Amino acid sequence: MARKSVTKKILIVLDGLVKETASIIYPYKGLGKHFRKFEGSFSQALYKIKQRGYIETVENAGKKYLKITQKGRLKLIGTDKLIKWDGFWRIIAFDIPEEFKKTRDVFRHKLSELNCKPIQKSVLISPSDISDQLDNLIELLNIDNYVEYFICKVSTNEDKFLELFGLEKQ
């Protein structure tokens, strides 16, 4: 598996420090302790991450805090380690209008990062339980009206899909 970039590592730590209902997190001056081996580049990494729009600085009662942006949360999708096949197939079908082409391209790219393989142009399949990541992705991109998600046990071409993912029949 590929190593995570400093950007993703920082976003993962920031994401781990925030509760779902909180919008402001840990003061950034103390955050460096999580990245001791990156001491020289930590400030530069934070600066670059802010420039890319993955985090933003907010002020509350005179103190500065870091907050992950929607773009930062989107970057995190696909970083989770996917578990072994449980015998169920996840099928994602979508019909995102041409006016949202960029969103459709981002969605398709993120599905690829989640190890989904196309079986038709807008129908993808995965042997992994990606329900949580998919829910987050659909919410972040605001495309819930254009995506359907199915979980099934049997497939007419299961041998073809097993081979596609390098799996053995259960």
Image: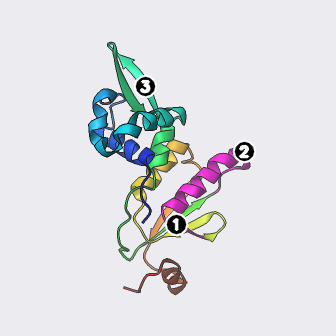
Identify the secondary structure beneath mark 2. Answer: helix
Numbered disc in front, either 1 or 3: 3
Identify the secondary structure beneath mark 3. Answer: strand
For the record, the magenta segment spans 95-118
* Residue nearest the observer in this picture, 81 or 142: 81
Name the quadrant of the N terminus: bottom left
Query: What's the distance in space between the residues labelled 1 and 2, CA to CA?
Result: 24 Å
**Residue 114 picture location, percent across and down:** 48, 61
Left or right: 6 with respect to 147? Answer: left
Most extreme residue toward the front is 40
Numbered disc in front, either 1 or 2: 1
**Residue 61 picture location, percent across and down:** 32, 13
**Nearest to N terminus: mark 1 or mark 3:** 3
Left or right: 21 with respect to 1? Answer: left
Residue, disc 3: 57
In the rendered image of this protein, does residue 68 appear above or below residue 146?
above
Identity, as a three-letter code, of the amino acid under mark 1: Cys
Identity, as a three-letter code, of the amino acid under mark 3: Thr
Image point 42% across, 59% down: which residue? 3
Residue 99 part of the magenta segment: yes
Residue, disc 1: 116
Query: What's the distance in space between the residues labelled 2 and 3, CA to CA?
Result: 32 Å
Image point 41% across, 85% down: which residue? 168
Residue 76 part of the magenta segment: no
Query: What's the distance in space between the residues labelled 1 and 3, CA to CA?
Result: 34 Å
Identity, as a three-letter code, of the amino acid under mark 2: Glu
**Residue 93 picture location, percent across and down:** 58, 62
Numbered disc in front, either 2 or 3: 3
The image's mark for residue 99 is 2
Identify the secondary structure beneath mark 1. Answer: loop
**Nearest to N terminus: mark 1 or mark 2:** 2
Considering the whole magenta stretch, tell me its main secondary structure. helix
